[in-house]
Image (spheres, helix red, strand yellow):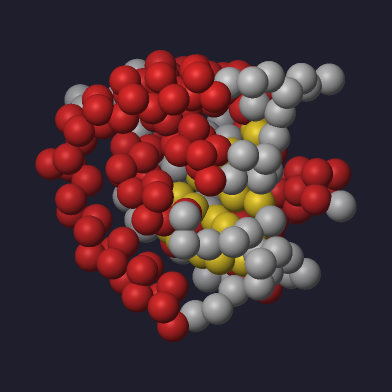
Amino acid sequence: MRRLINTVPVLFTFLLIYGSQIEQYRSDVEKWEKDIQAFEALDQTETYPDDSILFVGSSSILLWSTIKEDMAPYPVIQRGFGGSKLSDVAWYTKRLIYPHKFRALVMFVANDISGSENDKSPEEVGRLFRYILDVVREKYPVTPVFYIEITPTDSRWGSWPQIREANRVLKTLCDEDPNAYFISTSSHYLGSDGKPNPDLFREDELHLNRAGYLKWTEIIKEALGPVLG
């Protein structure tokens, strides 16, 4: 059973120390400014139910064109920007999340470890998510937060050991928060040979196809149900 612990002093200290460190990402994150401004403009013209599920993340959230139909009867707010990393979400957390009232936050960001020379370590992935979660907790102290496991894909299979370790770190951080939940998905996307099932992915071997999204929908709803009722 999870215990609610008074973490306010620790949270404040972490935000103070690590908040200054995310300044290092400024040159990388500024390319998303127009996307964030587009979301802010949308916030001024669209209204959403207070019991919406807010989905924030990278291209898999952006490309989920049937999210409203798939996630029904849950109303949704879709805030995905393709190619984004946790460092991008960390930089824009308040602008992405604070304008909204929502029943739960669901995150999926999968680009911090991709096989490039600029990959983050699993530990850095964890620190960024911890920062995001703590910023969220400043305004939404008990709102459920769900993190969808980074999916195993053929295009990044060479980095799967590091991605799998990042998933382990992310799950540990979710387990430490009484209202955060890690949605395990990887076993559903691996075939009998232990490798990513091509039937669930687009030709780019990275993004989900319709069958992949339907499976995602099922898994996510199964995770939301016991928490949200």
Q: Is residue 95 left or right of residue 165?
A: left
Looking at the picture, how far across and down is residue 90, in whole percent? Answer: 36, 40
Examine the rendered structure and indicate whether residue 213 appears above or below residue 147. Answer: below
Q: Is residue 178 left or right of residue 202?
A: right
Looking at the picture, how far across and down is residue 188, in whole percent? Answer: 69, 39
Examine the rendered structure and indicate whether residue 69 appears above or below residue 10. Answer: below
**Residue drawn at the location 58% of the way across and 21% of the way down:** 7
Q: Quadrant of the N terminus?
A: top right
Q: Quadrant of residue 73?
A: bottom right
Looking at the picture, how far across and down is residue 183, in whole percent? Answer: 67, 37
Examine the rendered structure and indicate whether residue 131 appears above or below residue 37. Answer: above
Looking at the picture, how far across and down is residue 174, in whole percent? Answer: 62, 27
Q: Quadrant of residue 128?
A: top left
**Residue drawn at the location 30% of the way across and 43% of the way down:** 91
The number of numbered discs placed on residues in the rendered structure image is 0
Q: Is residue 21 left or right of residue 113?
A: left
**Residue drawn at the location 71% of the way across and 28% of the way down:** 178
Q: Is residue 63 left or right of residue 105?
A: left
**Residue drawn at the location 65% of the way across and 26% of the way down:** 177
Q: Quadrant of residue 170?
A: top right
Q: Going by the picture, which residue comes out furthest to the left? A: 27
Q: Is residue 197 visible?
A: no
Closest to the observer, 122 or 22: 22
Q: Is residue 97 visible?
A: yes
Examine the rendered structure and indicate whether residue 206 appears above or below residue 191. Answer: below
Q: Going by the picture, which residue comes out furthest to the front? A: 9
